[in-house]
């Protein structure tokens, strides 16, 4: 074997790697639930500002994890921003409930969603629940800015006999908004 060729291949492979891994940006997460504040103003609703670094994902997110529930909320938010209402409503356990919820959002000129860190998984009667703090913000029908805190509650059925694949995936059970 020609060792010069091997050295060339190893050298070229190393050229694409970063020299200093400590210079990589850190991801910061919100570790608490959404603040409960008056919803009448625009600037008084925010997710907690916790600058605790979060480890970079080391592989695929497990579909049963709280992080996977958070991804469903991210997908819901992206669909809402794109006004893809039927697809957003399909992420709910009951699309009719999803349609009732999004009916209010449809009237806004613009709606966006800030997403906080998913809470811990909690079990109850054959299901797992995760709460994800969110903030809806944008421009209402009259052109005024708005911000409104809420909690998205996601549910998946445990791996119980007779449950379907669709039931064992995370879906929005409900979204609880403040006054």
Image (tube, rainbow, N blue to C red):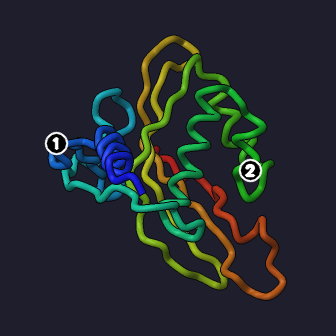
Question: Residue 127's spot in the image, x, y percent?
Answer: 64, 78
Q: Which residue is mark 2?
A: 97
In the structure shown, which secondary structural element does the residue marked by tag 2 occupy? helix
Residue 51 position in % (x across, y down): 19, 50
Q: Crowding near pointer 1: few (<14 within 10 Å), some, many (20+)?
A: few
- Secondary structure under tag 1 reads helix
Where does label 1 land, which residue? 23
Residue at image location 80% in from the left, 78% down from the top: 163
Query: Based on the displayed image, in which of its 4 quarters is residue 153 positioned?
Result: bottom right
Crowding at mark 2 (Cα within 10 Å: few <14, some 14-19, many 20+): some
In this rendering, does residue 47 appear at all?
no
Q: CA distance from mark 2 to mark 1?
A: 46 Å
Q: Between 126 and 29, which is closer to the camera in this rendering? A: 29
Q: Residue at x 54, y 12 (%)?
A: 142
> Do callouts 2 and 1 mark residues in contact (Cβ within 8 Å)?
no
Q: Earlier in the sequence, mark 2 or mark 1?
A: 1
Seen from the viewer's position, the closer of residues 85 and 35 is 85
């Amino acid at each position: 074997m020609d060792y010069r060729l091997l050295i060339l291949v190893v050298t070229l492979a190393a050229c694409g790697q970063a020299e200093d891994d400590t210079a990589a940006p850190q991801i910061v997460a919100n570790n608490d639930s959404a603040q409960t504040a008056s919803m009448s103003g625009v600037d008084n609703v925010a997710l907690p500002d916790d600058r605790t670094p979060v480890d970079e994902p080391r592989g695929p997110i497990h579909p049963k994890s709280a992080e996977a529930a958070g991804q469903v909320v991210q997908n819901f938010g992206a669909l809402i921003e794109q006004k893809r209402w039927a697809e957003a409503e399909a992420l709910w356990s009951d699309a009719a409930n999803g349609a009732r919820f999004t009916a209010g959002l449809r009237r806004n000129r613009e709606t966006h969603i800030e997403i906080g860190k998913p809470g811990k998984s909690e079990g109850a009667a054959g299901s797992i629940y995760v709460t994800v703090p969110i903030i809806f913000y944008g421009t209402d029908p009259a052109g005024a800015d708005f911000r409104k805190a809420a909690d998205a509650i996601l549910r998946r059925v445990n791996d119980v006999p007779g449950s379907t694949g669709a039931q064992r995936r995370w879906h929005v059970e409900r979204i609880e908004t403040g006054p």
